Image: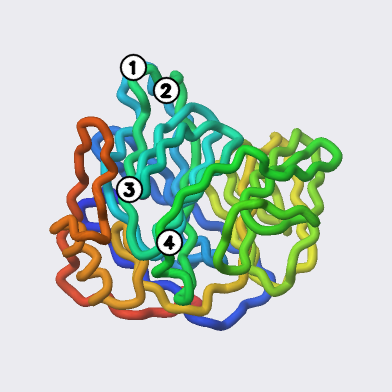
Amino acid sequence: MSDRDPRPEAYICGGSGQSGPEELLITSRRVYLGKTTEVARALPDRVIRMVGAWCFLDHYGPEDVARSAGMQVWAHPHTGLQTVTWLIEGEVEHRDSVGSLATVRPGELNIMTAGRGIVHTELSRPDHPPMLHGVQLWVALPDAARFTEPSFASYDDLPHISGDRWRGTVLLGELAGVTSPARTFSPLCGADLEAEPGADVRLQLRPDYEYALFVVEGSLTAGGTTAVVDQLLYLGCGRRAMELATATGVRALLLGGEPFAEELVMWWNFVGRSHQEIVDARRAWESRADQFPPVVAPGERVMEAPPMPTVPLRPRPRRQAAR
Ligand code: MN
């Protein structure tokens, strides 16, 4: 995905300092990508800008794309992050500037490490399936890894966890004693949980991680707070276990990670550390410098970067101070 907001807001995240357990309910914003596609954006939020290294969460669909072109996200750059694409329904074709060509399908994790710079396209083929439903998340790379070589990997052998009337897929990191094969650069985890009506899900957590649940379908209750579709329930740090109940049945993402200590500057499709880095990345994309080689997609079209904000992007805490 790409942020197509013509005047994207700058989110400056990071900073140390852990909180204890809490329940903070966040409702996604509606964001238009291009003329027709609308997504729910849960991260970055004005208060909770990150969960561990997870710094971006878009939920799109379920959308009937039978009579439309479907996803049409043309060539655009990324730096300093990993994109994590997880489809619930449909198909998307991924191409990138390191030569990858992959069909993204439900149940397969696609993870693109932008590192110092990558370009990709995400397109529905003309003969695409009628429905499109998925999430795209970004993981910020820590300073030691953010200039790493760009790469792309696809995993169709992710480990599963299960209990009475529920099951889950571990996308990244470790949860409930099983570990995803996907490469990560900071301590974090991500899982897709599905529970039937009436199920009680109990999971061991790490007290040094902060966690959040994002509802993709149905509804859930955790710690006395109920979350519905497109809501993110931030759970804070310091928990050794989590209980999740659902009256309706639910599909939800569990995101967790060590609170990300570094301060970030996130703007458009770039994650950096300073205003100047963002200016440089934007300029490199405009001039198609070596950092951003062609994708070589048939009939490749290119997304232009929006104008820089008129005020410099300044560091702020990773989380907005208490209101
Ligand atoms: Mn993208």
- Mark 3–mark 4 Cα distance, whole angstroms, equals 15 Å
Estimate the spatial distance between the alpha carbons at disc 2 and disc 1, rounded to whole Å.
Answer: 8 Å
Q: Is residue 142 above or below residue 227?
A: below
Mark 4 or 1, closer to the camera: 4
The quarter of the picture where residue 241 lies is: bottom right
Q: CA distance from mark 3 to mark 2?
A: 30 Å
Q: Secondary structure at mark 1?
A: loop
Q: Nearer the viewer, mark 3 or mark 2?
A: 3
Contact between labelled residues 4 and 3, with CB atoms less than 8 Å apart: no
Mark seen at residue 67: 1
Residue at 58% in and 63% down: 24
Query: For the point 67% across and 55% down, which residue is it?
Result: 225
Question: What is the spatial separation of the Cα atoms under label 4 and label 1, in whole angstroms?
Answer: 33 Å
Q: Which residue is mark 3?
A: 97
Give the crowd class for mark 2: few <14, some 14-19, many >=20 residues within 10 Å. some
219 on left or right of 246: left
Disc number for residue 64: 2
Give, as a three-letter code, the residue at label 2.
Asp
Kindly identify which numbered label has been placed on residue 262. Answer: none
The amino acid beneath tag 4 is Leu
How far, Cα to Cα, is label 4 from label 2? Answer: 30 Å
CA neighbours of label 3 inside 10 A, class few (<14), some (14 to 19), many (20+): many
Quick one: quadrant of the N terminus? top left
Q: Are marks 4 and 1 in contact (CB under 8 Å)?
A: no
Mark 4, residue position: 81
**Whether residue 57 can be seen here:** no
Furthest residue toward right: 164
Which label sits in the foreground, 1 or 3?
3
